[in-house]
């Protein structure tokens, strides 16, 4: 009996202990509200990299405080190394080494086998060479720069001081460098002996602009000539080949020229690579211009002539074609030159093999009012000099014209189709006409020509041009005889696209090459996918035709990186409630492995949730939006709501947003959901000619859909947007009184004055923005003057009753700050409640931390005052 009583007592004590434990643990696990003091705990995952063998991964965790950290860790084991504040991180191609640069410490080289990290101070840049066997870096001490090349296996090192410039070959087996004091150009063969050879030494002006061809058997560079009475610097051009034996030097001196270079200068034009090298290692492309005397005359008057092709500032920047740089090709071994660029067709793009050039004249059809004028294209065989016009009035914007990887074909978008021009056969074929479906954007709602869904490139063998329609990927034979759809997106309402970030290549180094990627179809394709329900992920298309899911789920899946030498890959996964995490997967393993789950502290706080909503505008257009619920949402309770607008935004359904002290558009979404707000991101569909009215129609419809749920304090709804969203915000509050407060960032408010103005950079008119781009009027001001007035906010200012906060950057080159000023002065005269915040030193997108912090606080205070009836604070500085 006593034993029984003792046993009962023991059980009672245990039960009481467990109950107490539950209470204690329950208290510990109670989630609390996130406060601004907690924001600094949140990090952002970025800069993911995977070693070629798939055994190691590195990634960066960045913080608003700037105290970023790079982490290197094993994909299978438990080893992990941290590198605070490091940047420029990379694995060697053999997977044995990892390197990065950190402030104060310099270059860190991590031996992934031993875990030892070797640091070298004062290193500014580095690169792995010869598949990772060697590492080259530039070390700067004071004004002097030193080149070091290290054999990572043996520790053997080569050093060269007084470096002015350094450039390794694409294969990493040879490098060239220029010394400053000696003014010499030298070669170094990157092998166990570190053999060197001096190409040239001079007491004259400096050498510069080293460039290799892709095969690493030819090098070119420039040397400055003494300054004369003409504008700009003239140059000699040098070419070196026969790298496998005794290097052979060729020199082109424009001062000694008796041929087409006579009287011209070899120049380094802005925003262009000064030299281009053909893959065959036999020709160099460079730029020349006619000499122009330095003008010492003071400008008395600017003549803005209405008959000139461009406005005065643009015309002045371009000068005349006589003084514009034009491309020339040189065959050093034959001492042969040919002018590719001409006064009639001065602008040049090269085919990938460098044997053909495509020329155009951007002034040909000016004045006109597209972002880029249509042009005629002339194709020139640089070997023979023969030219012929192949296209007339071709649109240049939106990648409407590209080339194949070897330069045999030009593919261009015209008359709603993709065409191919066969250079050898001089023939044009419409490849997409047989498809019978649109390959231009069906829901395009701006003025002008609808762009194509895209063409990422060609197959390596150039048998197929790859083209996208709304959902699928097509392989179209270059002869137009076959069309093959390799995905089934239309049936599943899933959009498939090649994961183009994994495929980048150019056979000719430099930016004068007409773009065109190439894809080895024999190795299959990595395909990214996104569904209309916002699910996303990746698939692998097998050359035999079947497509296999890698990962696809009701989350945001992105940043796929495949290991070069193993069947493994990483990707990033997130949702609104799931902070981004890095996943690792191999073909053999059924389930992926979590390498890092960011922001685990979120588990200690209340969080919100979101959902995709559907609604229609007054025309019956089906639309979607994302509704975010506040943390600790309670059914039956109503909440204030803020509506954030900017065209279509429902694709952010699965994006994770950190709480933050600032944001580019002054609206950190999560800050508001954590503080008791509903937040709505609706999609907007536009009727060309009625941008403001369309926005009001769609946004009001979205708000009504949400308020019908009975969860919104209808007297406490706010509206915000920036840039075009700022315009929409300001316009919408002139059309409805359902919003209790609004914030409009860098808004355009007067269509007439903005239309008749110039962009801050370059001096081009802003007319194209209205006629064929985002402002969506579709016609000129003078074809629909009343429409411009009706869609202008200042013209509707008297109808604005919503308290409006306006903000602009004083140096905004896209939307002048005076647009915000016009609305502020109008509302001021009308005695409507408003404030105008102007930030000196900021452009269209704010960059200064203190500026973004101030604007974010003021925006929050504005909404808190009008939507939560909190008093304004006086502690935000106006200095």
Image (cartoon, rainbow, N blue to C red):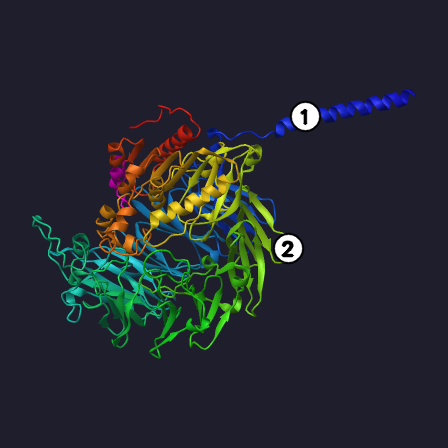
Q: Position of residue 731 (x, y in %)?
A: 33, 42
Q: Earlier in the sequence, mark 2 or mark 1?
A: 1
Q: Is residue 558 above or below residue 323?
A: above
Residue at 90% in and 20% down: 2
Nearest to the observer: residue 186 or residue 358: 358
Nearest to the observer: residue 484 or residue 597: 484
> What residue does disc 2 label?
589
> What residue does disc 1 label?
23
Q: Quadrant of the C terminus?
A: top left
The reply to whether the magenta stretch includes residue 820 is yes
Disc 2: CA contacts within 10 A as few (<14), some (14-19) or many (>=20): few
Q: Nearer the viewer, mark 2 or mark 1?
A: 1
Q: Is residue 58 above or below residue 12?
A: below
Magenta highlight range? 812-824
Whether residue 41 is visible here, answered yes or no, is yes
The reply to whether the magenta stretch includes residue 625 is no
Residue at 35% in and 60% down: 398
Q: Position of residue 168 (x, y in %)?
A: 37, 58
């Amino acid at each position: 009996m006593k034993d029984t009583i003792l046993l009962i007592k023991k059980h009672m004590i245990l039960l009481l202990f467990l109950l107490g434990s539950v209470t204690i643990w329950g208290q510990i696990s109670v989630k609390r509200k996130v406060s601004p003091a907690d924001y600094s705990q949140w990090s952002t995952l970025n800069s993911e990299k995977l070693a070629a063998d798939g055994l190691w991964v590195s990634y960066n965790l960045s913080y608003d405080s700037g105290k970023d950290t790079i982490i290197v860790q094993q994909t299978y084991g438990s080893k992990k190394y941290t590198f605070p504040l490091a940047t420029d991180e990379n694995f060697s191609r053999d997977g044995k080494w990892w390197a990065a640069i950190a402030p104060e410490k310099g270059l860190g080289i991590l031996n992934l086998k031993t875990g030892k990290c070797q640091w070298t101070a004062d290193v500014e840049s580095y690169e792995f060479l010869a598949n990772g066997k060697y590492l080259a870096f530039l070390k700067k001490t004071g004004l002097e720069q030193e080149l070091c090349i290290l054999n990572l296996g043996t520790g053997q090192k080569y050093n060269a001081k007084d470096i002015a410039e350094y450039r390794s070959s694409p294969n990493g087996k040879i490098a060239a460098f220029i010394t400053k004091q000696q003014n010499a150009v030298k070669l170094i063969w990157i092998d166990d002996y570190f053999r060197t050879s001096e190409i040239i030494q001079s007491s004259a002006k400096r050498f510069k602009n080293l460039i290799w061809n892709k095969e690493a058997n030819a090098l070119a560079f420039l040397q400055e000539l003494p300054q004369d009475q003409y504008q700009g610097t003239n140059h000699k051009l040098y070419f070196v080949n026969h790298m496998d034996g005794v290097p052979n030097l060729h020199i082109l001196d424009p001062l000694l020229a008796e041929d087409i270079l006579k009287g011209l200068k070899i120049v380094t034009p802005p925003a262009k690579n000064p030299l281009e090298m053909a893959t065959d290692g036999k020709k160099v492309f460079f730029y020349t211009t006619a000499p122009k005397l330095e003008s010492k005359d003071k400008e008395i008057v600017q003549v803005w002539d209405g008959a000139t092709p461009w406005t005065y500032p643009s015309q002045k920047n371009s000068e005349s074609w006589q003084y514009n740089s034009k491309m020339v090709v040189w065959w050093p071994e034959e001492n042969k030159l040919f002018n590719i660029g001409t006064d009639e067709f001065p602008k040049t793009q090269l085919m990938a093999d460098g044997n053909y050039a495509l020329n155009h004249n951007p002034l040909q059809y000016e004045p006109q009012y597209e972002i880029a004028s249509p042009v005629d294209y002339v194709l020139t065989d640089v070997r023979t000099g023969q030219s012929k016009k192949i296209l007339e009035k071709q649109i240049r914007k939106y990648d409407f014209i590209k080339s194949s990887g070897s330069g045999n074909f030009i593919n261009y978008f015209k008359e709603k189709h993709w065409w191919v021009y066969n250079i050898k056969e001089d023939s044009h074929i419409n490849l997409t006409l047989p498809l019978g479906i649109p390959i231009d954007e069906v829901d395009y709602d701006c003025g002008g020509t609808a762009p194509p869904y895209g063409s990422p490139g060609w197959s390596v063998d150039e048998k197929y041009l790859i083209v996208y329609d709304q959902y699928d990927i097509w392989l179209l034979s270059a002869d137009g005889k076959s069309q093959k759809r390799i995905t089934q997106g239309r049936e599943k309402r899933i959009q498939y696209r090649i994961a183009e970030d994994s495929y980048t290549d150019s056979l000719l180094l430099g930016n004068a090459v007409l773009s065109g990627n190439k894809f080895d179809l024999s190795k299959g394709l990595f395909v990214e996918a996104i569904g209309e329900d916002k699910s996303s992920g990746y698939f692998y298309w097998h050359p035999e035709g079947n497509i296999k899911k890698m990962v696809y789920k009701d989350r945001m899946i992105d940043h796929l990186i495949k290991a070069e030498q193993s069947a493994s890959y990483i990707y990033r996964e997130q949702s609104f409630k799931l902070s981004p995490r890095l996943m690792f997967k191999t073909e053999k393993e059924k389930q992926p492995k979590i390498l890092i789950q960011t922001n685990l502290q979120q588990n200690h706080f209340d969080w919100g949730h979101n959902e995709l909503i559907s609604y229609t505008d007054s025309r019956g257009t089906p639309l979607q939006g994302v509704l975010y619920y506040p943390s600790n949402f309670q059914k039956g309770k109503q909440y204030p709501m803020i509506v954030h607008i900017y065209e279509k935004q429902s694709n952010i359904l699965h994006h994770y947003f950190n709480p933050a002290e600032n944001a580019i558009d002054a609206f950190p979404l999560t800050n508001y959901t954590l503080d008791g707000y509903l937040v709505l991101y609706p999609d907007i569909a536009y009727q060309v000619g009625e941008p403001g009215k369309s926005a009001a129609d769609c946004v009001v419809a979205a708000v009504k859909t949400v308020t019908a749920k009975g969860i919104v304090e209808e007297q406490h709804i706010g509206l915000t947007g920036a840039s075009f969203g700022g315009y929409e915000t300001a316009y919408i509050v002139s059309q409805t009184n359902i919003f209790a407060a609004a914030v409009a960032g860098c808004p355009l408010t007067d269509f007439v004055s903005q239309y008749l103005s110039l962009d801050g950079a370059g001096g081009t008119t802003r007319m194209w923005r209205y006629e064929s781009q985002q402002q969506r009027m579709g016609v000129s001001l003078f074809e629909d003057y009343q429409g411009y007035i009706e869609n202008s906010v200042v013209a509707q200012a008297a109808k604005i009753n919503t308290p409006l906060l306006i903000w602009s950057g004083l140096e905004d080159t896209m939307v002048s700050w005076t647009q915000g000023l016009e609305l502020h002065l109008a509302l001021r005269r009308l005695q409507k409640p408003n404030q105008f915040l102007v930030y000196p030193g900021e452009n269209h997108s704010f960059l200064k931390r203190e500026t973004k912090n101030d604007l974010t606080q003021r925006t929050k205070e504005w909404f808190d005052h009008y939507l939560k009836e909190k008093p304004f604070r006086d502690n935000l500085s106006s200095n």
